[in-house]
Amino acid sequence: MMDRLLHMFHVTTQAELLWVLFGFFAQTLFMMRFLVQWIASERARRSVVPVAFWWFSLAGGVTLLAYAIHRRDPVFILGQGLGTVIYVRNLWLIHAERHLRG
């Protein structure tokens, strides 16, 4: 079974297999933001970007960034690194706006 998984994911060690599984987990977190946004928009009958969208973006982005760093993929690192900054900034703006409102 283990040999089959190693072959299927084009890895040679169990450690690399764990990283691939971690990458799938990270991608799932990242995809959840779209599901959250879609459900919120359907309920409101208009386009909505809920705060959970930004939290899933951050969680998925950070875990994908860790995966990209492990894989040493400069394109993926740049994309997820910049995205992470943007997600943190959006969460900061939301926090600041709520703080101002009381």
Image (cartoon, helix red, strand yellow):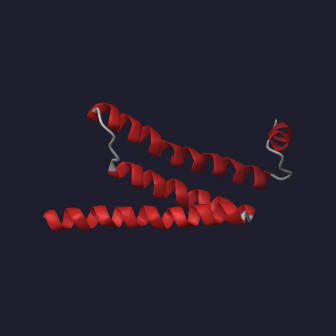
Instruction: Please identify the quadrant where the N terminus is shown.
Output: top right
The residue that appears at 83% across and 50% down in the rendered structure is 11
The residue that appears at 62% across and 66% down in the rendered structure is 78
Q: Nearer the viewer, residue 44 or 53?
A: 44
Residue at the front extreme, as displayed:
46
Tell me residue 37's x, y (percent). Answer: 39, 41
Specify the quadrant of the image occupied by residue 71: bottom right
Drawn side of residue 62 relative to residue 44, left or right:
right
Drawn side of residue 20 relative to residue 78, left or right:
right
Residue 56 lies, with reference to residue 39, above or below; the image says below
Tell me residue 55's x, y (percent). Answer: 41, 54
Tell me residue 34's x, y (percent). Answer: 46, 42
Q: Nearer the viewer, residue 4 or 40?
A: 40
Tell me residue 16's x, y (percent). Answer: 77, 54
Number of dots carrying numbers:
0
The residue that appears at 72% across and 63% down in the rendered structure is 73
Specify the quadrant of the image occupied by residue 87: bottom left
Instruction: Please identify the quadrant where the C terminus is shown.
Output: bottom left
Residue at the left extreme, as displayed:
102
Residue 30 lies, with reference to residue 46, above or below; the image says below
Residue 25 lies, with reference to residue 92, above or below; the image says above
Drawn side of residue 99 relative to residue 71, left or right:
left
